[in-house]
Amino acid sequence: MTDNDDPSDLTLMRTASMRVGLPAGWEAEIDNGSGEAEAGTVVATPRAHIANFALPPNRGDFGSGAVERMQAGDVLICLLEEDPAVIGSRLFDHAGLPSVTAEDFSPTGMQRPIRGQSGAQKFFHVNARAFALYVVVGSHLSRASFIDEINQVIAAIDVS
């Protein structure tokens, strides 16, 4: 669902539990865990896919189906909710939405390496909910040029 009533230049994508403000040229799909993912696979937990390119209809949790189509200027942000029982673990001890730096990205940070691409992953909790954030840039060499916009999008995520 798109809500264009916001007076800013952001498009809002929202569900009952998650909302994200999108800069011009970005799109998002938020699934509360009841929709289909890849070919008949049901999404068991809430997730959001946010991109500055057209998202293909079938994608895995970490963007499979989309990352293979990415070009040098493309960015994909995947936000996946994890079991709240992991809150308090060392991995998920960061409170609040994280930001990313160019140094966070690495070609080895990809779920599945794709030549030229780079990934970053962060784990955190907010509002008693645990999340994995996975960000892919289409060009490792150009990653620094996308950091401000990526962090703008991450900061516009609202998890209730």
Image (tube, rainbow, N blue to C red):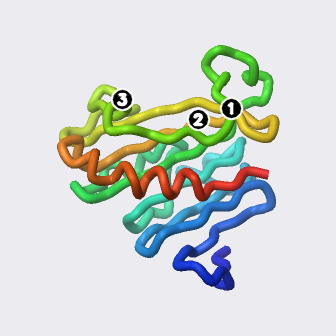
Against 22, residue 148 (above or below) is above
- Judged from the image, the secondary structure of the residue bearing numbered disc 1 is loop
Q: Amino acid at mark 2?
A: Ala
Query: Under tag 3, what secondary structure?
Result: helix
Residue 63 point in image, percent of width and height: 45, 47
User: The residue under label 3 is which amino acid type?
Assistant: Gly
Whether residues under marks 2 and 1 lie with C-beta atoms below 8 angstroms apart, the answer is: no
The numbered mark, 2 or 3, whose residue comes first in the sequence reads 3
Q: Is residue 10 left or right of residue 105?
A: right
- Image-based side of 146 in relation to 5, left or right: left
Cα gap from disc 2 to disc 1, whole angstroms? 12 Å
Q: CA distance from mark 1 to mark 3?
A: 22 Å
C-alpha separation, residue under disc 2 versus residue under disc 3: 13 Å
Residue drawn at point x = 39 percent, y = 53 percent: 148
Give coordinates of residue 7: x percent, y percent. Answer: 63, 83
Please tell me whether mark 1 or mark 3 is closer to you in this view. Answer: 1
Tell me whether circle 2 and circle 3 mark residues in contact (CB < 8 Å).
no
Position of 91 relative to 74 (above/below): above
* Residue 47 x/y as whole percent: 63, 48
For the N terminus, which image quadrant?
bottom right
Q: Amino acid at mark 1?
A: Ala
How far from the left and from the top, in percent, is residue 130?
A: 71, 33
In the picture, the disc for residue 95 is: 1
User: Could you say which quadrant of the image residue 61 lies in?
Assistant: top right
Q: Residues within 10 Å of mark 1 (few under 14, many from 20)?
A: some
Residue 109 disc label: 3
State left or right for residue 94 relative to residue 160: left
Residue at 60% across, 53% down: 48
The residue wearing badge 2 is 132
